Each structure stands twice: as C-alpha cells, then as structure tokens.
C-alpha cells in the first residue's frame, strides 16, 4: 500500500511544471493600469474600477485643502505616488492586489492545470502543495529545518531558531526544493542561491501517521518523497543537511551523493543528508 502510494505521488509531481519570466497575467486576470506602467494583475472588474476612479479624480479632491480628498475618500496608493481619491474599500483592494501580484503573473510558478497537487503518502497521510508568495506560509506546512539548531550539553534539549518550511519553485525549466526565508522560497541551482517570491509550500495532514527524516546516501531510501524535477527531467527528492549551525531543506537527484541548498548567495552541496519519508506515529519535525 505504501509503495503504491509513493509511486502515485511521484507521478503527480514529475509531470509538466512551467514558468515564464514575464509580467503577463494568468488567465482570468488583466493589468490594473491604475497609472502608467501599472502591470499588477487584477480581475477585469478591478481594472474597470481603477479606470472609473481615475476619471473621477478631480471631482474628489478637496478644493479647500490641496492634496487632500473630500470627506469619505482616501488616497488609493496603488504605488507611492498614487494620490487618486477612492473609497477605503478600494484602497484596501489595491493593497491586497499588490500583495497577491507575484502569484498572478504568467511567470509565477504553477503546476500544469491538468495535474492535481495532492497525493497520498501513506494510509493516513495526505500531502498537498499550496500556492504562496512574499513569505506566506499556510497552515500545516512541513517543517524542513531551522536557521539555527544547537544541542544543549548534558541535556536532550535542543535550542532552535528560525523555522524553515519546505517549498518549491521553478527555474530555467526545472523545479527545485527550497526553504521559506523572509519573503521568498530560497533554493540552490547552477552554483547560485535563487530567491523566488512566488512558490508552492508543502503541507500535510494526518489522523495518525506522519512524516520523518531518514539518513541515506546517494540512493534515496524506500518511500522517499519527490517534489520537483531536474533540468534533465528526473525526479528531485526532498532532503536536508546540517550547515552553518542550522538544518536546511533542499533537493537531491538519485546517484548524486549531495543535498543541494541555497545559502549566502551560493548553491551549497553537502553529503550526509536525510530524506523526507512517511512514517507511522512519528513527528515530522524530528531532527
């Protein structure tokens, strides 16, 4: 049952994944065009609202106080210089659209729409990749490590700082596993550390079973989870390694005795990795 479920998950994540490096909008969105060069992707209704607000801008300025809006209106602030007067709800919408912008472009990381993002890793564990951007982390995100991890002398306690959640993002035709750091999914590839503001986060849920980390060499252990695709089209497995006083999640391709992470602007490759595997009744954040 477990082997069959892992094969199913591998099939889900090894299909076509795509990115494009441009600011075209995904289907269903258009440029807002609240001001010249405004390429934030919004719904057609929001773009029409922006055009209507622009046409009413002069009538909503307070004639007694230049630079202020009449009562009931506020600056839209779609950017720092946008002083068109709109309702408070419209300004809130503009701020929300700005925040969601990286995930709405054609260049945003996304699975082929024909592929599901969910797969069973065991009888009672479900994995799902959730869209994220600008540092967002959904509930039940898989903890991949910590920026700082230090055992305490004479004790079984461990001091940790800076949780690092497992994410994935596209680059140059491939999909890599990385970690959420501040506002991005950071991963190593082609000798450098890359930062993606649009990404997917690995989440899990289970009534009984869980996920764990298992040490292995260049051959992933049975049941190890794949989450991406190499430039050559091979499965990319989820791994992690201790580095610079922390534990960092990254990716591995079978046959290569190293886990690749992004750190300090570089791609760092080290042996001694652990792989993410489904395990019965064991916390997924065990070191």
Image (cartoon, grey):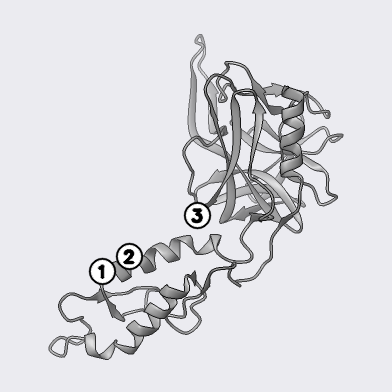
Residue drawn 46% across and 38% down? 139
- CA neighbours of label 3 inside 10 A, class few (<14), some (14 to 19), many (20+): many
Q: Nearer the viewer, mark 2 or mark 3?
A: 2
Q: Nearer the viewer, mark 3 or mark 1?
A: 1
* Residue 172: % across, % down: 75, 59
The reply to whether residue 237 is visible in this rendering is no
Question: Which of the 4 image quadrants contains residue 218?
Answer: top right
Outermost residue toward the top in this view? 154
2 or 3: tag closer to the N-terminus: 2
Between 44 and 95, the one nearer to me in the picture: 44
Residue drawn 62% across and 35% down? 248
Location of mark 3 (residue): 134
For numbered disc 1, what is the local secondary structure?
A: helix
Residue 20 sits above or below residue 125 on the image = below
The label on residue 36 is none
For numbered disc 2, what is the local secondary structure?
A: helix
Residue 205 sits above or below residue 183 on the image = above
Location of mark 2 (residue): 92
> Label 2 to label 3, Cα distance in Å?
18 Å
Count of numbered circles on the image: 3
- Judged left or right of residue 272, residue 148 is left
* Placement of the C terminus among the 4 image quadrants: top right
For numbered disc 3, what is the local secondary structure?
A: loop
Outermost residue toward the left in this view? 64
- CA neighbours of label 1 inside 10 A, class few (<14), some (14 to 19), many (20+): some
* Residue 89: % across, % down: 28, 67
* Residue 228: % across, % down: 72, 44
- CA neighbours of label 2 inside 10 A, class few (<14), some (14 to 19), many (20+): some
Location of mark 1 (residue): 88
Between 76 and 204, the one nearer to me in the picture: 204
């Amino acid at each position: 049952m477990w082997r069959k479920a892992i094969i199913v998950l591998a099939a889900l994540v090894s299909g076509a994944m795509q990115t494009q490096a441009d600011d075209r909008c995904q289907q269903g969105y258009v440029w807002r065009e609240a001001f010249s060069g405004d390429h934030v992707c919004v719904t057609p209704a929001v773009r029409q609202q922006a055009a209507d607000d622009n046409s009413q801008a002069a009538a909503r300025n307070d004639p007694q106080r230049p630079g202020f809006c009449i009562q009931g209106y506020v600056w839209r602030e779609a950017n720092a210089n946008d002083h068109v007067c709109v309702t408070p709800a419209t300004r809130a919408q503009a701020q929300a659209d700005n925040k969601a912008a990286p995930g709405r472009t054609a260049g945003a990381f996304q699975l082929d729409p024909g592929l599901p993002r969910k797969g069973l890793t065991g009888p009672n564990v479900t994995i799902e990749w959730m869209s994220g951007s600008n540092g967002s982390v959904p509930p039940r995100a898989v903890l991949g490590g910590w920026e700082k991890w230090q055992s305490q002398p004479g004790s079984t306690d461990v001091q940790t700082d800076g949780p690092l959640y497992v994410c994935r993002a596209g680059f140059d035709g491939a999909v890599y596993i990385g970690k959420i750091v501040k506002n991005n999914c950071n991963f190593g590839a082609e000798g450098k550390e890359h930062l993606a503001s649009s990404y997917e986060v690995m989440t899990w849920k289970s009534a009984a079973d869980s996920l764990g980390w298992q040490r292995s060499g260049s051959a992933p252990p049975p049941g190890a989870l794949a989450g991406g695709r190499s430039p050559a089209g091979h499965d990319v497995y989820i791994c992690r390694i201790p580095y610079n006083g922390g534990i960092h999640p990254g990716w591995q391709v079978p046959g290569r005795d190293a886990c690749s992470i992004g750190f300090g602007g570089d791609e760092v490759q080290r042996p001694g990795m652990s792989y993410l595997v489904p395990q019965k009744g064991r916390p997924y954040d065990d070191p």
